[in-house]
Image: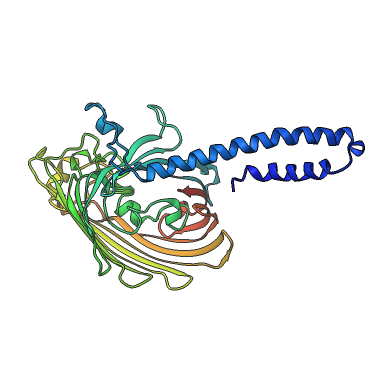
Amino acid sequence: MNKKTLPLLSTLSLALMLALQPAQAQTATEQELLRRVDQLAAELNKLRAELAQVQQQRAAEAAKPVAPVAPPSLPPAFAEAERPTAAPATVLSGYAELNYNRPTKNSKDAQADLRRLVLGYQHRFDEKTKVVTEIEVEHAVASADDAGEVAIEQAYVEHQFHPNWAVRGGLFLVPMGLINENHEPTAYYGVERNFVETAIIPSTWREGGIQLVGQLDSGWTLQGGISTGFDLNKWDAGSSEGRESPLGAIHQEMALARSRDLSFFGAANYRGIPGLLLGGSIFTGQATHKQQANESRITLWDLHARWTPGAWDLSALYSRGTISNTAALNLPLVGGDSLIPSRFDGAYVQAAYKLWEQGSYVLKPFVRWERFNTAAAYADLGAGLTPEVLAAEQVYTLGANFEFAPGVVLKADVQRFKQNKDQNRLNLGLGWSF
């Protein structure tokens, strides 16, 4: 029965009961109801007639053969554009860190800094192809008169041509160490990135080129390719930048990069055992680009491990770099404050422990020891000309990371230096990543 007839029948029933009462007993209200009965009865008859007509039409259509219906035609110029397609996946990302450093002996040199703010996006053109980009602003303000800078940190296209293999082309982070590819403040312990992975392995180190990436079912991740490299012609003997980080002083970041001499790199990381990471990498290439009579090769390699049994997070890394033919390159630089070292290296061990966790709150104290030397050896230039090697610096860091929301971390640590005790300091930091 049509649902619309139910209230009509109820009203009709009530009206029929009233109609059976004596006429003198009917009130004005009851007379009004009787009037509505006639009206509703007419509407009910009309609905029944419409229902019968609809049922007859359905029966007639069911008896007819069904012909395929062609989709509406589109003008040739718009046919592809109007055809429904899957929506592309675009993901925004970013990270930032705000740091406060207070030397314990020279508090007048304390400073606060918006160390970096990075915004990026990933856009997936289809299920196999995506683009990854990041733009970084350092020290809050970038201008001709300020220390800040704006830089492109990543800009590459990745295409997966096999379930286990992909190729990247563009500006990408070099796969070396533990934090160069994963350098967000939520990914490492301490307010500052460790010295070995900033002074020996420059961070964040990126090159332009082509890279092959393989994720094997056995637990191995393999990466390798050809890229731009370093430019020894940029070495400034009058600056201390080379002593702070030899390769950091001459990396090019794909900004009008000299590329007559290209470099090769490879990395292998094993994650086949839950909680364990073992890996190593190498980067090598000529670095004078025929701008000088003497050629020189730069080679940097590292071995690293990370193990996370239960609440523990244990890691270790060793890295070593060499620059060939530095004697010939240094002779014109004799008299400068900083000559090109022939060897530099560093290592660290670190232990962190998840001490407390409640809801989104996580407290992880940690301790780290590191030793590094940015000028461990110089090529012989003769008596009185060969620079003295630097004493290896050792740094002890004790602190904690406090995560109070997913992707947000507060940090605090103290650092003690063995050689340059004036660098002893307290560090505080706030960072986020999404």
Left or right: where 423 falls relative to 49 = left
Residue 311 or residue 158, whichever sits in front: 158
Q: Is residue 323 above or below residue 92?
A: below
Q: Residue at x 73, y 42 (%)?
A: 12
Q: How is the image coloured?
A: rainbow
The answer to whether residue 155 is seen in the rendering is yes
Residue in front for this viewpoint, 3 or 154: 3
Q: Residue at x 41, y 40 (%)?
A: 119
Please tell me in which quadrant of the rendered image residue 372 appears. Answer: bottom left
| 320 vs 169: above or below | below
Q: Position of residue 8 (x, y in %)?
A: 69, 41
Q: Where residue 55 appears, x then y in whole percent?
A: 48, 43
Q: Is residue 93 visible?
A: no
Q: Tell me what residue is drawn at x 23 percent, y 58 percent.
A: 163
Q: Residue at x 19, y 43 (%)?
A: 232
- Residue found at the very far left of the displayed protein: 293
Foreground residue among 8 and 279: 8
Number of numbered discs present?
0
In the picture provided, is 351 more to the left or to the right than 217? right
Image position, residue 249 (x, y; %): 28, 43
Q: Is residue 424 left or right of residue 177?
A: right
Q: Is residue 270 left or right of residue 379?
A: right
x then y, percent, for residue 315: 38, 66
